[in-house]
Image (spheres, rainbow, N blue to C red):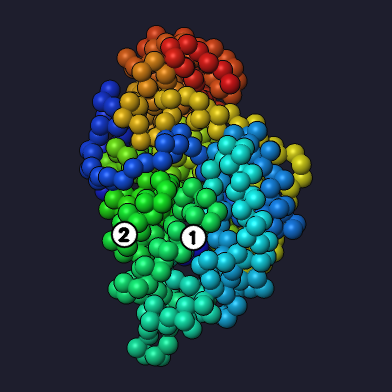
Amino acid sequence: MKRILPLLLAAAMAACNNAGNKPADQLNKKMIHNNYKKAGWINRTNIYEVNLRQYTTEGTFNAFAQQLPRLKEMGVETLWFMPITPIAQKNKKGSMGSYYACSDYTSINPEFGNLDDFKHLVKQAHDMGFKVIIDWVANHTGWDHVWTKTHPDYYEKDSATNDFKIASGMDDIIELDYKNPALRKAMIEAMRYWVTECDIDGFRCDLAFWVELDFWLEARTELEKTKTLFWLAESDPLEHPDYYQAFDACYTWTWMHKTEDFYKKHQDKNVLDSVLKDYNAICSGDNIPLWFTTNHDENSWNGSEYEKYGDMAKALAVFSFTWNGMPMIYSGQELPNLKRLKFFDKDTIEWNGKYELHDFYKKLLLLKKHNPALRAADPHVTTYLLSTTANESVLAFLRKNDDDGIITIINFSNKDINFDVKDDNFKGPYVDVFSDRWWDFDGQTHFEMKAWEYMVLSKANGKVKAL
């Protein structure tokens, strides 16, 4: 939902690329344990965020279902639907209100269709091999949520007004009271409803860090009795690392903001190296970072990925798919969508049938799915930072799982550069995923790369594998 997250200032650290041949996965680990059973599919999945209101002219479940074959062919694995619950009308924003101001946790927003429509969509998606997760807004509701009448004690009160407490200055939503055991139980049962009634596969939890961690631990413990789910938190591990106790994956907000600053302010690459080192210290073991270049918040409030990153946008997408973690795509990135979508009003994505970045994302999505070296939270995968003669501009790394390997090289500068990669790990036959050029590395190779250029080189089962 709309909000402003404080930027975490990265601690003063040596740049990642100065770590020599020491695996990046072994630098400064701060282990946070998650003892829950994991859904077996999350290590290789990707996320596609669905803004249902803006996706089609109709803005319905049934209209979106027609896009499933295209998304399947592109390689999408997991569909995340922004909130599907009805929207509160009191104090609503704009002409249609915010997805994130719920009026009933166990009903469908009639804007999208009905419960049977959603059930049919989930079944169709499952039959095609997709997983489905839904957005869950646990911290607050809209002003006319059914609980405001049936259970007003579920809410925090404002002592000054003796009315419901407004959520952090956003006057269309009000705060729930997690000190109330009855509220906790009701919230968990509302979440269970969607698991048992519609067979969803997990939750993306909005502003998870605004809700006490012990609630999420309680909720996951209870819901695991029904189904092993995927739990994604809108919470940055650099700010709230303990939330990995309850969640499988967490947002990398700091990285997203720092990369924008890096591009717009022409900063030195060691800023990025430092942030990656900070994430690496926390995102270890089963802890998965979620990487993205845009989402519903960023697009609507801060600008499209091209407003933010310009010529660096695709290089950052390549990073998101090949560094340790889970990648996410937002509705329309395959177009690409160049405009800011309105948040509270109808503003359909301007599809033109061309999908210019379909093949770009397809290569990355299929690579993520099929090459074991890109599995997230897999103890068999090691990430090695590769030494180059242009570490001040180039990020080069190898991800390795036994004989499977992926090498990524990105020129994070606005200049064409010549450089060598010199590293004992830089050996073997590889093929460039985007150009199909073959390479056979012997520990040192010379490269010429244009500004913001990227390379992704693939080796599978000890043999070169092209997609």
Image disc number at residue 218: 2
Q: Which residue is mark 1?
A: 193
Instruction: Mark 1 vs mark 2: give the one in front.
Output: 1
The x and y percentages for residue 154 are: 39, 77
Image disc number at residue 2: none
Viewer-proximal residue among 433 and 222:
222
Please tell me whether mark 2 sits on a helix, a strand or a loop: helix
The x and y percentages for residue 467 are: 58, 21
**Along the polypeptide, which appears first: circle 1 or circle 2?**
1
Answer few, some or many: residues within 10 Å of disc 2's Cα (few below 14, many 20 plus, some between 14 and 19): some
The x and y percentages for residue 137 are: 46, 64
Answer few, some or many: residues within 10 Å of disc 1's Cα (few below 14, many 20 plus, some between 14 and 19): some
Viewer-proximal residue among 400 and 125:
125
Amino acid type indicated by mark 2? Glu
Left or right: 379 in relation to 432: left
Q: Is residue 262 visible?
A: no
Viewer-proximal residue among 226 and 358:
226
Write the residue at 41% across / 75% down.
175
The x and y percentages for residue 151 are: 43, 80
Assess whether mark 2 and mark 1 are in contact (beta carbons under 8 angstroms): no
Please tell me whether mark 1 sits on a helix, a strand or a loop: helix
C-alpha span from label 1 to label 2: 16 Å
Write the residue at 53% across / 43% down.
131
Left or right: 344 in relation to 386: right
Tell which residue pokes out farthest to the bottom in this image. 161
Viewer-proximal residue among 440 and 142:
142
Left or right: 135 in relation to 67: left
Q: Quadrant of residue 389?
A: top left
